[in-house]
Amino acid sequence: KPGGGETPMLASSIHSVVLNPPWNVPAGIAARELFPKGAAYLARNGFKVIGTGANRRLQQQPAQSALGKYKFDFANPFAVYLHDTPGKGIFSSYDRLASHGCIRLERPGDLARLLLDGSAEWTPEAIDTALAAGKTVRADLPTDVAVYLLYWTAYASQSGAMNFRGDPYGW
């Protein structure tokens, strides 16, 4: 979303899929948006306060995680990743400027199975079993897969016709 939640442009490689991921809330989001809601809200929504004082941080437990059941990890200095979401309604909306920079996936299970295809350990059945167990597990990909986060407001179609999109970030 504009105003500090822009998705960065980058190139990296997905190296693993985290099944049943917790959400380690960035300090800024915790301070601005979550701690002010109070202890009852945090408890009701599966947040665990870790540490005390200036070092305290929030982690949302896997069963209620805003990341859903899948997180796709790739190295980057922005702490963004591709992930599932429990809020599937966003995909029917034209305006999807709601994230803090990460990319929500509509069909993360399909992507996880595709990326883990060829792994002796992470068969579709093993993935389903791990998800059902509810514990956080990291599944390393058999081969890293390139990921590019790009921001294009103008592009040419295969036929050469130009397409233009709005620029919500004002870039």
Image (cartoon, grey):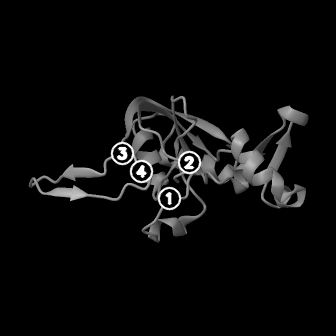
Residue 2 picture location, percent across and down: 52, 52
Reading the chain from its start, which is encountered first: label 2 or label 3?
2
Q: What amino acid is found at the position of numbered circle 4 in the picture?
A: Gly
- Above or below: residue 91 compared with residue 143: below
| Residue indicated by mark 3 | 151
Mark 3 closeness class: few <14, some 14–19, many ≥20 residues within 10 Å: few
**Residue 135, quarter of the rendered image:** top right
Left or right: residue 140 versus residue 61 is left
Q: Are marks 4 and 2 in contact (CB under 8 Å)?
A: no
| Residue indicated by mark 4 | 170
Q: Closer to the camera: disc 4 or disc 3?
A: 4
Q: CA distance from mark 2 to mark 1?
A: 9 Å
Q: Residue at x 41, y 50 (%)?
A: 170
Query: Secondary structure beneath disc 2?
Result: loop
Query: Secondary structure beneath disc 3?
Result: loop
Q: CA distance from mark 1 to mark 3?
A: 13 Å
Q: Are marks 4 and 1 in contact (CB under 8 Å)?
A: no
- Above or below: residue 21 compared with residue 12: below
Residue 43 picture location, percent across and down: 85, 56
| Residue indicated by mark 2 | 5
Q: What amino acid is found at the position of numbered circle 3 in the picture?
A: Tyr
| Residue indicated by mark 1 | 97
Reading the chain from its start, which is encountered first: label 4 or label 1?
1
